[in-house]
Amino acid sequence: MALADIQTCFSGNPLDRADQMRTDPEIFGDIMHREDARVMLLAGESREDDGQMRISLSSEARILTDAGGTIAWQSPSKCRFLPVGTTIFLGLDGDAPRYAVMLDGSADEFGAMFEAEGAKFRDGRGIAYKLEGAHPSLGIIAQAKSMLLWHESHRYCAKCGAESMLAKAGYERTCPDCNAAHFPRTDPVVIMLVRRGNEALVGRGHGWPEGHYSALAGFMEPGESMEEAAAREIFEEVGLRATKVIYKASQPWPWPSTLMIGVEAWVDEGELTIDESEIEDAIWITKDDVKSSARGEHKYRLTPPPFAIASDLIKAWLAE
Ligand SMILES: [Zn+2]
């Protein structure tokens, strides 16, 4: 049964996260002893930095996928001789445990080992494109990628600076010096299709590909409701006052760990006052504009990639 009217890309993770098993040594002790266990592999990207090749894990961790783009699950015995970095427990598929492992090295180094079976390290956007935005693998990828990147960037205790340790199968880090507990974070972003009469408002950020427009968006701030954040962002970016904000759908967005909260925001009449420090441009469009853009007959690209929630918000508007 679908939980939401709109099924977004990277949601719909089919695994049972099995929180109650995260402290079970059978689950997170020696994972190699269970024949039914399966592991997904992630690795960093090699980048040249000041003339030296470095492995970047900041945001573009790559995921081992099969030829079709779905996760290429590996048996524990196959991983025995790989340089395993951080490991987390993802959950259960039936009774069988699933894990994600960040390899200690770059995707370029390990790629050749999996070529014979047709598997390849791909980036998240490439996988989402290949799977056309809808596949259970994408929900698991969102979980694994966000969790592993959190570990990479939270190695030290935020209270005392000591090196912290992974706990609860990856869902906590604890500090051996001051006993502080740290938990994986998710950063909420509101993304809104601004509406007025029969039109919707779309904008474009600085540096976007020529002619591309999408829904306005911005990070929520502490002490704000989702509706207030949407109204504030709209006023900051285009100077219009929202009169009503309606929740539509949400989407995990693993760059690195965001929750996109998709809304429709109705605004009063008024002139657009664009804050060019925030966005480059914003325009009112009609449903016909979107349809002609989809046919390649419009001067602007008004159809965001199918895996972005902005695409779902626009489709929901078109379907009204
Ligand atoms: Zn500490």
Image (tube, rainbow, N blue to C red):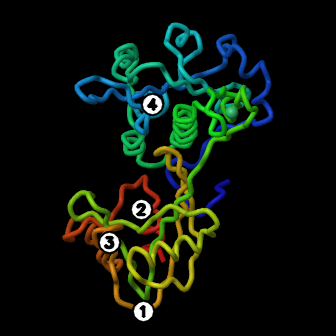
Under circle 4, the secondary element is strand
Q: Residue furthest front?
A: 160
Residue type, label 4: Ile
Which label sits on residue 311? 2
Q: Is residue 128 left or right of residue 242?
A: left
Name the one closer to the observer, 134 or 85. 85
- Which is nearer the N-term, disc 4 or disc 1? 4
> Can residue 285 be seen from the camera position used here?
no
Name the one closer to the observer, 161 or 313. 161
Residue type, label 3: Val
The 10 Å Cα crowd at callout 3, few under 14, some 14 to 19, many 20 or more, is many
**Number of numbered discs visible in the structure rendering:** 4
Q: CA distance from mark 4 to mark 1?
A: 47 Å
Report x, y in % for residue 140.
Answer: 56, 38
Q: CA distance from mark 1 to mark 2?
A: 25 Å
Residue type, label 2: Ser
